[in-house]
Amino acid sequence: MPIAISKPLRLMNPVAVRSSSLAQVAYDSRQSILQVEFRDGTAYGYAGVPLSTYHDLLRADSKGAYFNRHIRSLFPYAVLGVAAPVESD
């Protein structure tokens, strides 16, 4: 369920995560928007995500699995852009 985000968001305080699919995440608590950048460089914004879900994502053993189960198809999203892919370790 794609949505329009009124203005492009900059990743505020992005957190690099250990994941085979996610590169970094950031959270805007004023707007309850979770930003997710994938290893292929694509970034998405998910609206209405509770702060607790963001914290749970950061604590999850498998960030990708948590994202797929608890965020991906549950919150409206917008494509924020595509950057250069992130190299794997």
Image: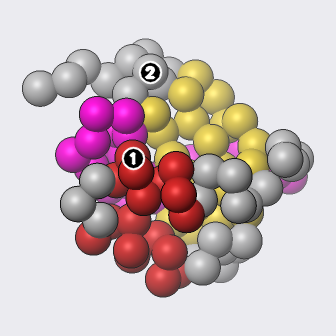
Residue 13 in magenta?
yes
In the rendered structure, the answer to whether residue 62 lies left or right of residue 34 reads: left
Examine the rendered structure and indicate whether residue 85 appears above or below residue 63.
above
Q: Position of residue 1 (x, y in %)?
A: 84, 47
How far is disc 1 from disc 2 in space, using C-alphas? 14 Å
Q: Residue at x 48, y 54 (%)?
A: 67
In the rendered structure, the answer to whether residue 5 lies left or right of residue 89 reads: right
In the rendered structure, the answer to whether residue 7 lies left or right of residue 62 reads: right
Residue 18 in magenta?
yes
In terms of depth relative to the viewer, which is nearer, 76 or 69? 69
In terms of depth relative to the viewer, which is nearer, 62 or 2? 62
Main SS, magenta region, reads loop
Query: Which amino acid, mark 1?
Result: Gly
Callout 1–callout 2 Cβ contact below 8 Å? no
Residue of label 2: 40
Assign a secondary structure to mark 2.
Answer: loop
Q: Residue at x 28, y 53 (%)?
A: 62
- Using the image, tell me which numbered label, if any, was put on residue 56: none
Residue furthest to the left in view is 89
Q: Is residue 7 visible?
A: no
Residue range of the region highlighted in magenta in the rendering: 5-26
Residue of label 1: 64
The quarter of the picture where the C terminus appears is: top left
Q: Position of residue 71 (x, y in %)?
A: 59, 59
Mark in front: 1 vs 2: 1
Assign a secondary structure to mark 1.
Answer: helix
